[in-house]
Structure formats: structure tokens, C-alpha cells
Image (cartoon, helix red, strand yellow):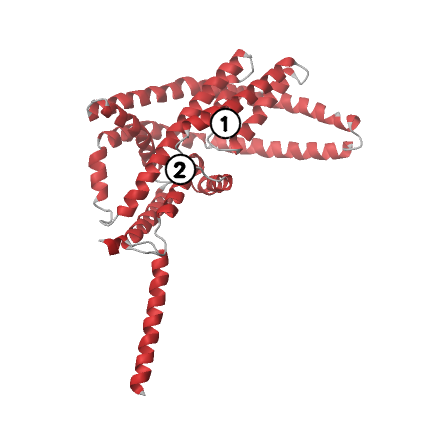
Amino acid sequence: MKDGSLVMSTQAEFVNLHFFRERFKRFLPNSQAISLAFILIVSFALIYSLSGVLMPVFASIILAYLLEGLVAKAEKLNLPRLPAVCLVFSVFMTGLIFLLFYLMPIVSQQAVELIQQIPDIIRRAQTEILRLPKMYPQFISENKIQEIMFAVQKELLTYGQNMLSVSAASVVGLVSALIYLFLVPMMVFFFLKDKRLLVEWFLQFMPTDRHLTVRVWEEVNVQMSNYVRGKFVEVFILWFVSYITFATMDLNYAMLLAVLMGLSVIIPYVGATLVTVPVFAVAYFQWGLSNDNFMYIVIAYSIIQALDGVILVPVLFSEAVNLHAIAIVVAILFFGGLWGFWGVFFAIPLATVVKAVLTAWPRIGDKSPDMLC
């Protein structure tokens, strides 16, 4: 009897062990999956915990990664690595100087002028709103309008107080900006110049069994590089076309609105909706609804947005991974909440990383690479 109970106990333990082992394999089917999971967890933890301290380093890595594609193309033209890096870095610095010393002053000046016009805009808006009860008494009353205006004035007062607090903290922001302007370009140059040396140093800390990780990275690298570089091209084209259009039509704050148009494509779906309000508002308070120029601005804006969606996006992102609209919105909210502007900008590439990991992750019934070796 003892032998029988011992056999039954051994069988039960074997069944339980087999059950837990199968459950474990469901999530971590092989050592390569364990390596991939370890790399992802450690990378996310380091970036999340050190982003506040090492943000200039992360920004430099991102910029060097984006410029590496241009360096690689220059190398394909039989240009040695160092001259290729110097050429690409010179183009990068030229663009940075143009941004800082030409574009930013114009945008800042127009933004200040627009802010100074806000009281006049509010007064005109109040005049128009107070006419609504007379025009549509069956829909809205004068008391309701006054309640709405009081709430708006209260919000504007709070916004003004917040702007003063931001201005008080601008000295700290200026110091940080100066640090970025000095450190980031320098680190970008060395990241590009010593790429192979830095990659070899970094790989010595990685797990040796990383075939699955390499496969995921190759897919992510293609998708991310195509998306980010395409997005930069889209921002530039939309800014340039919008500025030429607005300046030709003599719209106030043309450069500021063109920059907003370019930056709006960073946030899919949401950005185009948000930028519509300032463009139409400036055109309305400049000309009014009855003026033909207002309708011309509306038509021109609609054409630019249509050409961007119908022609520019398919051409630039033909090789990008298609993501569902809900996945894009969730990625923007999640990564934007973690890393602010950079999180929003890289929301779709990071969502692509998640999709690539889920696609490459071994499933039950797949042959384990450990068994094949």
C-alpha cells in the first residue's frame, strides 16, 4: 500500500510540475524570450527613472539615431565615416542655427503680438456672443450668456496667473536651454563619430542569447526610422507650404500659424483639430465672416490638410506599420503622460515596438529555438 500511495504521490507531483512548467512556457517559452523580456524591463526602468537627470543624453541619442540614416547614405557613396559624420553634423548645425536665430525670434515675436491682442479679441467675442439671445431667444437666454462669460473670465484670470508663474521660472528654463545648446550638439557628434565603439561597449553587457531581441530590433529599427524621418519631412513640408500660403494671403501671424500647422502632424487626429481653431480664429477677427478672404483661408487650409492626408502621408509612410486609431490614441496618452513632448512624438514608434514584440513573441506550439539548437 505504501508503494502504491508513493507512486500516486509521485505522479501527482509530476502532473503539478508539468502543469506549472507549461504555464511558465506560455509566458517565457525559451531563454531568448527571457532575454528579450529582461532587456525591455531594464531599458524601460532606466529611461523612466533617469529621464529627468539624463534627458540631454537621451535627446542626444535620439538625434544621433535620426542622423545615422544620413550618415549611412553618405557612406554608401564611398565617403569615409568621419567625413560623412562631419558633413551630416554640419547640415544639422545649420538647421539648428536657422531654427534658433531666425525661426524662433519670428515665432516668439508673433506669439507676443497675438497675446497682446487677446483683450481686443475677447471684447469682440463678447460683443458677438451677447447678440445671440436677440438672434436666437428660443435657444439661449441672456442670463445663461452672462454665466458663460463670467466662467470664461474666471478661467482667463487663472490662466494669466499661471503665465506669470511660468515667467518667474523662465530663468531656470533659460539656464537649462543653454546647457542643452552646448551639451546636446557635442554629444550628438561623438555618438555619430564613435558609434561602432559605443555599440560594442554596450553589447558586452547584453545577454549572449539575444537572437529574438535582434530580430525584434531589426523590425523596430526599420519601422521607427521610416516613421520618424518621414514625420520630420512632413512637418517641414507642411510648415513651408502653410507659410507660403498664409503670407501670400496676408494672414496675420503667418509664421506662427505655419509652425503650428507643421507641429500639428506630430499628434495624429488630435493635432489637425486643435490647429484649426487658431487659424480660423485669426482669420475671423482679421476679416470677419462676410469677407471673401476668410473663405479663401478656409478653402486653402482645407486643401492643405487634404493634400497632407491623401498624398503626403501615403508617400512618406508607405512602409510604416498600420496601427488602429484606438491604439494610436492610447499610445499618445500613455507615452505622452510618461515623457511629455518626446513621448507624444515617439508614441507611434513606441507603439510599433510593442506590436513588434507581441508579433515576435513565441507562442504555445511554436518550436523553441532552444530545442532546435
Question: Callout 1, which amino acid?
Answer: Gly
Is any part of residue 54 visible from this angle?
no
Residue pushed farthest bottom?
A: 1
Q: CA distance from mark 1 to mark 2?
A: 19 Å
Q: Quadrant of residue 227?
A: top left
Q: Which-is-in-front pick, marks 1 and 2?
A: 1
Q: How many marks?
A: 2
Q: Position of residue 319 (x, y in %)?
A: 39, 32
273 over 201 or under it: above or below: above
Q: Position of residue 151 (x, y in %)?
A: 67, 35
Residue, x 45% and y 18% (percent of image)?
A: 240
- Direction from residue 240 to residue 50 in the image, left or right: left
Residue, x 20% and y 36% (percent of image)?
A: 197
Q: Quadrant of residue 18?
A: bottom left
Q: Residues within 10 Å of mark 1 (few under 14, many from 20)?
A: few
Question: Callout 2, which amino acid?
Answer: Pro
Closer to us: 2 or 126: 2
Query: Element at badge 2?
Result: helix
Residue, x 75% and y 27% (percent of image)?
A: 132
Q: Where residue 309 is drawn, which disc sits there?
A: 1
Closer to us: 183 or 86: 86
Q: Where residue 45 is drawn, which disc sits there?
A: none
Residue underneath mark 2: 349
Sequence order check: which comes first, mark 1 or mark 2?
1
Closer to us: 51 or 250: 250
- Direction from residue 198 to residue 23 in the image, left or right: right
Residue, x 52% and y 11% (percent of image)?
A: 248
Is any part of residue 186 visible from this angle?
yes
- Direction from residue 117 to residue 255 in the image, left or right: left
26 over 3 or under it: above or below: above
190 over 27 or under it: above or below: above
